Amino acid sequence: MNIDYKKEINRLKKDLDVTVVAHYYQRDEVFEMADIVGDSLELARRCQSDGKEWVVFCGVGFMGQSVKILDPDKRVLMPKIACCAMARMMDGLYFEESVQYMEERGIAREDILPITYINSDASVKAKVGEMGGFVCTSSNAFKIIEKGLETGKKILFVPDRCLGQNFAIKMGLKSCVIGVEVDGKECDPKVADIICFNGFCSVHQLFTVDDIEFYRKKFPNIKIAVHPECDPSVVAAADFSGSTSQLIKYVNDLDPEQKVAIGTEYNLVNRMRKGNTYVLSSTKPECPTMNETTLEDLYNTLKSIEDEKPINEIVVDPEIRKYANMALERMLALK
Ligand code: 13P
Ligand code: SF4
């Protein structure tokens, strides 16, 4: 039997008490079916107030988890529980090892203020929440780090070293990465303001300074805009760096004749203004886990609600939820 997925998805959305949510990195055909689209900060905020019993979240695992943590009464299903590769680089154990690293070098636990990028597992957010720390996204990292500095504590930034280092540079702060030596010296938490865990996004590591030079040689007046998950050398060489929604605004505000090359996920760049817009890479920078979700998966998930046999439901342990929620709410309270 051939199913017209789009037609069926629209019927199910009408019949069920559900909101379909999609991150900007989703495939076009999935993205088009969503009631709410956005970057990770917008989605975390907007799902809270939609008044629906069910959320079907097309994105990666930590995003669905965040909705469940913020509103435990919501039933959150994910067509694919695909895990962001960066989020997978850290768990509660690695977090504790990072704290221990700082303690062994003379910084007491109570003098550490942890900040976790929202691209992290609930268990990491819980550890951060328990220590009085914050979640941040690439949209609000500046504000959250500023707030963290007010405590006078050392900032432990996890799991993305690039985001931590890029914002340290932007704010005129010193940073180092645990396990990475610079000029033969290991990361010294006593000297640095921000101590970063050595995690990264494999998609955003694809963009290089050579790519920027290539485009600048080809089109001398081109603008280069990148996501702050890119390496600090790439961010330093670019004209602009910003989160997903900040990149969209930057490109929309450009003169239509202005050429721009963008260093972020392919599906988003491909959907931006047509003409004079380039992907800053010779390879296709697709996020493999974001791309796992298909129209068929979305249909199957909605159908499972109709059939009263929900699939891929997000469950968060209550103790983890309690502390992870503190870290998320501290972020949202800062607006
Ligand atoms: P945004 O916070 O910009 O949506 O980024 C999420 C992400 O996973 C980027 O790779
Ligand atoms: Fe994670 Fe990178 Fe994919 Fe974003 S692009 S979801 S950080 S793997």
Image (tube, grey):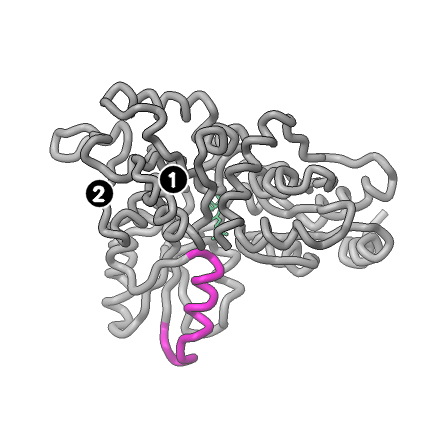
Of the image marks 1 and 2, the number of the one nearer the N terminus: 1
From what the image shows, is residue 269 above or below residue 83? below
Relative to 145, say whether 270 is above or below.
below
- Which numbered disc, 1 or 2, marks the residue closer to the eye? 2
Is residue 249 rendered to the left or right of residue 5?
left
Q: Residue furthest left?
A: 183
Q: Secondary structure at mark 2?
A: loop
- Residue 180 spot, x, y in % from top left: 24, 31
Q: Residues within 10 Å of mark 1 (few under 14, many from 20)?
A: many
Dot 2 alpha-carbon crowd within 10 angstroms: few under 14, some 14 to 19, many 20 or more: some
Q: Is residue 101 left or right of residue 72?
A: left
Q: Is residue 25 visible?
A: yes
Q: Residue at x 43, y 79 (%)?
A: 256
Of 249 and 46, nearer the camera is 46
Which residue is disc 2 drawn over? 174
Numbered range of the magenta stretch: 243-259
Query: Which element is circle 1 on?
Result: loop
The part of the image, by quadrant, that contains residue 304 is top right
Disc sitting over residue 160 in the figure: 1
- State yes or no: residue 231 in magenta: no
Amino acid type of the residue tagged 2 in the rendering: Lys
Q: Amino acid at mark 1?
A: Asp
Residue 125 or residue 38, whichever sits in front: 125
Is the residue at mark 1 in contact range of ligand 2, meaning its CB lies under 8 Å from it? yes
Q: Residue at x 47, y 65 (%)?
A: 248
* Residue 40, horizontal then vertical, whole percent: 53, 50
Does 239 sit above or below residue 96? below
Location of residue 244 in the rendering, given as x and y in whole percent from the top left corner: 47, 57
Give above or below for 169 relative to 124: below
- Kindly indicate the quadrant of the structure image that contains residue 181: top left
Which residue is pictured at 54% across the width and 41% down the height? 289
Residue 248 part of the magenta-drawn span: yes
